[in-house]
Amino acid sequence: MWSRKRLDIGWTDFAAGLLGSGLRWNREHQHQAIEQAWSTDRESLVCLSVRSGWDLFLSTLNLPPGSEVLMSALTIPDMARIVEAHGLVPVPLDLDPNTLVPTVESFERGLSERTRIVLVAHLFGTRNDLSDLIAAAHAHNLMFVEDCAQAYIGPSFRGHADSDAVLFSFGTIKTATALGGAVVQIADETIRNAMRKRQAEYAVQSRAKFAQRLVKYAALKFISLRPCYGLFVQGCRMIGRDYNAILNKSVKGFGTAAPIERFRSQPSAPLLGLLKRRIQRPPVDRIERQASLGRRIYQQLATDVPCPGGAVPEHCFWVFPLSPSDPQSLIESLRDAGFDTTQGESLCVVNTPKDRPELDPAVSRQLLERLVYLPLYPALTESACDQMAKIVQKQIREPSKTP
Ligand SMILES: *Cc1c(COP(=O)(O)O)cnc(C)c1O
C-alpha cells in the first residue's frame, strides 16, 4: 500500500541528527551558520517552530487587547489560537477558490479600525504573487506577515521582499524537515532584535527529547515504506485500533491543545545542527520531482475534478488536495486500490467574530469539508500517479457504481 505521506528526510539526516544529539553543543555557532546559509538581504531568526516565531512576534508587538488580525481563513488551528492567547481577535479572510489566497476585496471587507496585522498563508505548495495584498495592507499601515510553511522550495524562494515578516517551517510534515525549527525573516531591525532578546530568555529544548523525536520519526518513516505500510494497516485492523487516529496523533508536534508556553523554547543545538544541514543542502531535485508528479496528476484531472489551487502557475505540490463532492467514497475507492488517502484534518477554518457574521468564509468552509489529500511524494512512480488519476476520474463520473 502507498502510504498517505512520507516524511521528507533521509536516513543519513536521521543519522546526522542522532550524532549531533551527542556531539553538538554550540548553539550560537549553528545559528550563525543557518543565517548565513539562508542568506537573503533580510536578516532572519531561527525559532523552534513557525508557531513559536508567530507567538514571539506578537509578544514583541504587544498590541492593545482587542486588536484584530486578518488571517487567511484556512490555516492550522494553532495560528489562530496563538492570536487569541495574546488577547487579539482573529478575523478570517475568505479565500479565492482559484488562488487560495484572499482577494484585495475580501481584505477590504475584513478591515476595521482595530485591524493591525494581516497574515496570509501560501497553501498546499502554491506560491501566489502577494504584491497587491501587501500594498493594500501597507496603505492602511498594517503589518503584513507571509506564512510560507507549506511553500518551501529551497533558495529560489524566500518570500515577498515587502513582507514585514516571512515564516518558513521545518516541522515534521514539511518539505526538507528537520523535525522542527523555523526560519523567520523580520524586516524591522528593532522588532527583530527585540524578538531575539526575548527568545534568548526562553529555556532550551531538551537534547534528549530531540533525540527521542529522531528515533520516533525514523520508525514512522520506516513504517511508511510501501511493504511495511500495508502490514501496519492490517496489523492495526487486527488489534482493533484506528490507524488513522494513531498516525494523526503521532505527527502533531505539540499535541492539540498545547498551552502557549510549549512554543516558548529555544531550539536545541542538535536541532539547529540538523536544520543547518537541511538548509545547506536543499533537496531541490526531490522538490522538482514532486512538483512534476503533481502537475502530471493535475493535467489528467483538472477538467473534471476540482483541484484547489491546482492552476496556480508557481506550485510545488507540497500536497495534492482534491475537493470532490463525495470525499468518503473516493477515499474508499483509492484505499481499495492501494492508495492511502486522507481528509484535511490538520487545517481549520478561522472562526468568524460574533459581531461580524457577514465575514463568514463560506468558500473556505466548503473547501475544507470536502478536502482530500492524494498521497504524493518523490518515491511514487508515474504509473502509480496515473492510476490514482484514473480512479479519481472514474469515481467522479460514475459515483453511483462505488460501494
Ligand atoms: C505547518 C504550518 C504552520 C506551523 O508550522 P510549525 O513550524 O509546525 O509551527 C503554520 N502555518 C501553516 C500554514 C502550516 O502549514
Image (cartoon, rainbow, N blue to C red):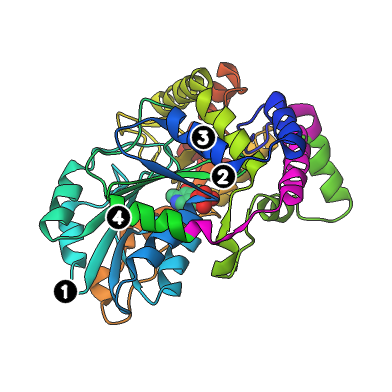
Q: Earlier in the sequence, mark 2 or mark 4?
A: 2
- Point 64% across, 61% down: residue: 255
Looking at this view, name the residue that lies furthest to the right: 239
Residues 280 and 117: in front is 280
Q: How many marks?
A: 4
The three-letter amino acid code for the residue at tag 3 is Val
Q: CA distance from mark 2 to mark 4?
A: 27 Å
Residue to which mark 1 is pinned: 113
Does 143 sit left or right of 237 as displayed?
Answer: left
Does 387 sit left or right of 59 as displayed?
Answer: right
Q: Vertical placement of 302 versus 380: above or below?
A: below
For discs 3 and 2, the disc positioned in front in the rendered view: 2
Mark 2 vs ligand 1: CB below 8 Å = yes
Q: Position of residue 150 (x, y in %)?
A: 45, 41
Q: CA distance from mark 3 to mark 4?
A: 51 Å
The three-letter amino acid code for the residue at tag 1 is Glu
Q: Position of residue 167 (x, y in %)?
A: 40, 46
Q: Residues within 10 Å of mark 2 (few under 14, many from 20)?
A: many
Q: CA distance from mark 1 to mark 2?
A: 35 Å
**Residue 387 is covered by the magenta coloring:** no
Look at the image and give the residue range highlighted in magenta.
Answer: 199-228
For discs 1 and 3, the disc positioned in front in the rendered view: 1
Label 4, secondary structure: give it: helix
For discs 1 and 4, the disc positioned in front in the rendered view: 4
Label 3, secondary structure: give it: helix
Residue to which mark 2 is pinned: 171
- Point 35% across, 74% down: residue: 88
Q: Quadrant of residue 270?
A: top right
Q: CA distance from mark 3 to mark 2?
A: 30 Å
> Residue 392, labelled with which disc?
3
Q: Position of residue 25 (x, y in %)?
A: 68, 40
Q: CA distance from mark 1 to mark 3?
A: 46 Å
